[in-house]
Amino acid sequence: MPTIKDVANKAGVGIATVSRVINDSGYVGKKTKEKVLKVIDEIGYHPNEIARSMTRQKNHIVAFVLPNNKHVFFSELLYELEQILFEDDYKVMLCNSSEETYKEIEFLNMLKNNRVDALILLTNNDIEDEIDSKLPIISFDRIIENVPLCTSDNYTGGQMAADILIDKGCEKFLFIGDDAQGVNTPVNTEVSKRRIGFNERLKERGKKQIYNFEYPLGNYLIQPEKAREVLLKYPDVDGIFAISDAVGFTLIKELEALGKNVPKDVKVIGFDGGSKFFDYGRKLSSIAQSPKKIAKALRDMILNFSDNQPVKDIVLPVKFNEGDTT
Amino acid sequence: MPTIKDVANKAGVGIATVSRVINDSGYVGKKTKEKVLKVIDEIGYHPNEIARSMTRQKNHIVAFVLPNNKHVFFSELLYELEQILFEDDYKVMLCNSSEETYKEIEFLNMLKNNRVDALILLTNNDIEDEIDSKLPIISFDRIIENVPLCTSDNYTGGQMAADILIDKGCEKFLFIGDDAQGVNTPVNTEVSKRRIGFNERLKERGKKQIYNFEYPLGNYLIQPEKAREVLLKYPDVDGIFAISDAVGFTLIKELEALGKNVPKDVKVIGFDGGSKFFDYGRKLSSIAQSPKKIAKALRDMILNFSDNQPVKDIVLPVKFNEGDTT
DNA sequence: TTGTAGGCGTTATCAA
DNA sequence: TTGATAACGCCTACAA
C-alpha cells in the first residue's frame, strides 16, 4: 500500500503538501495540486484511515448495541441508521448483545478502547454502574441517569391504544407484555410507559375491568402456550393491547385457535409498526414507531456529540396504523 | 483518557514493560507485573485500539457488504457472523449497499483505506473491475475471478427440489426466480445454480414439462400481481420451486387466492430456511441453508487471511426442511 | 506557497 | 528483566 510519503516523493513535494491536497486544506498551488492528484491516481494511493484516526482520536464509527438484529423492528432501525449515517461518512458497528450482560459490558469497553465516536445502547440488563456518562453514549428506550435518551412516545402510544379500543366499544381490557425487559436484572425502560399510558387512559375514561399480564418475555417473543394460558385465564376480555406486534400476532393466532373472531369478539392492537407483517397473514392494527425518524434523531444526537454540543433527549411521535384486527 | 505512558510513569517503569504486561508477551518480573496491573486498574487505563491498529495495520474489523440487513435470511446470517466473530474479538461493520453500485464501490474503497481485516462481499452489481484480488475479500454467493467464494450447494439444492417434487407425483414444473440478481448489471451468481440443478435433474428423470420464469426481482421480493400473472400463465403446473422462501410465500398466497389447494393441487418448495416464517402462516417446505455453518465458514476464511494462509472456496451442504406445502 | 519536524499511542527491536 | 527508541502513516504548527 502506497503511503503519503510515496506520493510526496514521486510528485517531488513534501508530505504536508500532499496532506493539504487530500484534505483540501490550506494553500496549495494549482499546478502542484494537479501534479499531486495525478500521482495519487497513478500509484493508487488511498489515505490510511487508521493513521487519520490516530491523530484525530476518532474513527468515524458508531457502535449500535442491541439485543438482536434479527428482530423485525430492530432490523429496520439498524438499516435506517446505517443508511443515514452513511451520508455523514460514519460506519456502523453491529453489536448484538443477545441480551447477555457480559456482552453489553464488553461493548461498553469497546467504546473506551476503540474510540468509536458514539455508542447507541439498547440494554436488557442493569449496567448503569458500568456507564461513564462522560462518554458519548446514547440510550435508546432505556432510562439511564445522565445518559441522553432517544425513544418513541410510548406513553401517548398507550393512551392511543386505550382510546381506540374504547371508541370501538371494548369494555374489558388486557395489556400483555414484558414490563421489565431485563433478562437478568430489571431495567428502567421507556417501554413500560406503554402499559402505564394504556392503564391511565382507561381509568380516566371510567373503565374498570383492566387486566395486566406482565410476562418476562425471552427473546422478545411470547410462547404460544403461555399466550393461550393467559387468554384462557381472562376469557371475557374484548380489547387487547400487546406490547409489540410480535406478541400481538401470537395472540391473534391463539385467539383464533380458541374459536374467537378477531376483531369481532376481540380487538387487538400491537406496537411497533404492523406493516412489516402484512405479507404473512392478518394486518395487525398497531401503534407505529418510525425507524426512519428514530434514525434521524440518533444521527442528530451523534453529530452533536461530535461538535461538543449539548445532547438533549428526544421523544418521537407515534401513529396508529389501522389494520384489520380492530 | 490515560495512556500507556501515564501507567508507566505512575508505576515507575518503562512503557515497554507496560506493553509487555497488557499483551502478556515477553518477560516481566512478577512484582513489576503486579504493580503495573494495579496502576492500570487504579487509573482506569484502556489500551487505545486505534494506536494498536496503527502498528499492526489491522483493526480487527470485518466489513460485511450485503444488499439489505432487513431480509430475513441476511439478517440471520449477519447475526450468526457477528456472534461467531465476537469470539475471536473481531467486530463487524454493517455495510448495506441497498443494491446500489456506488455504495458497493465505496465499501470496497473502505477496505483499501486500510480500515478492515476482511471484507465479505455480497454484490448485486458487476463490480469485478473494481476488485483488487490481492485484498482480503471473500465473496458470498457471487462468482468473482480470483476471489474466494463461500456459498451453499445451490446446485444440489435444485436437484433435491426436483427429486422431492417428482417423488410426490408432480408432472408439470415451474421454477420462478431472479436469475441475474443484479439490479443494474447482471452478476455471475451461484444462485442461478438452483435453477440449473432443478432443470437438469428434472430432465435426467425424464420430465419434459418444465417452465422457467426468470423475473428480475427488486429487493428480493416478487410483486403479488406479477406472481399471479405467472400462475395464470401456467395454470396446469403442479410443482413449483421458488428461488427463495419469500417468493415461495407470495406464490402460496396467490395460489390460494386463485382457488388452488397447496399442497394438494400444487406443491411448493422454497429456498433458504423456511422455519423463519413458521409463525406467520403456512409452514413452507424449503431447501435450507445454514446461516450458522456459513458464518463459521466465513470465520475460517477470515482467519486464514489473517494468518496469510491460502483461502479456499467453501461450498456448504443444504438440507430439506419439510413443511406443509409439499 | 511549501517543507520540516513533532506528536498521536502502540509495538517491537536491541542494548543494557 | 528492563527501558530507550524507532517505526506505523498522517496532520499541523511553525519556518522558510
Image: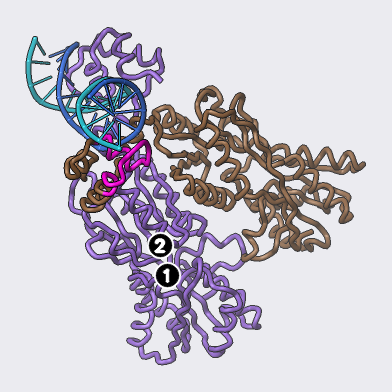
Chain colours: A purple, B brown, C blue, D cyan
Expressed as whole percent of the image width and height from the top left, the position of residue B267 reads: 80, 56
Other-residue count near label 1 (Cα within 10 Å), few / some / many at <14 / 14–19 / ≥20 = few
- The amino acid at mark 2 is Thr
* Rendered position, A121 above or below B309: below
Which residue: 75% across, 53% down? B320
State left or right for residue A269 relative to residue A20. Answer: right
Q: Looking at the picture, how far across and down is residue A125, in whole percent?
A: 38, 66
From the viewer's perspective, tell me whether residue B95 is left or right of residue B272.
left
Q: Position of residue D2 (x, y in %)?
A: 25, 35
Q: Which residue is mark 2?
A: A101
Q: Position of residue A304 (x, y in %)?
A: 23, 48
Q: Is residue A303 visible?
A: no
Q: Does residue B64 appear in this view?
A: yes
In the displayed structure image, the side of residue B196 where residue B84 appears, left or right: left
In the rendered view, would you say B211 is above or below A32? below
Q: Which residues are magenta?
A: B15-34
**Quick check: A161 above or below B244?**
below
Image quarter in which the N terminus of chain B is found:
top left
Q: Does B167 sit left or right of B213 as displayed?
A: right
Taking depth in this image into account, of B290 and B192 the one nearest to the observer is: B290
Q: Which residue is mark 1?
A: A184
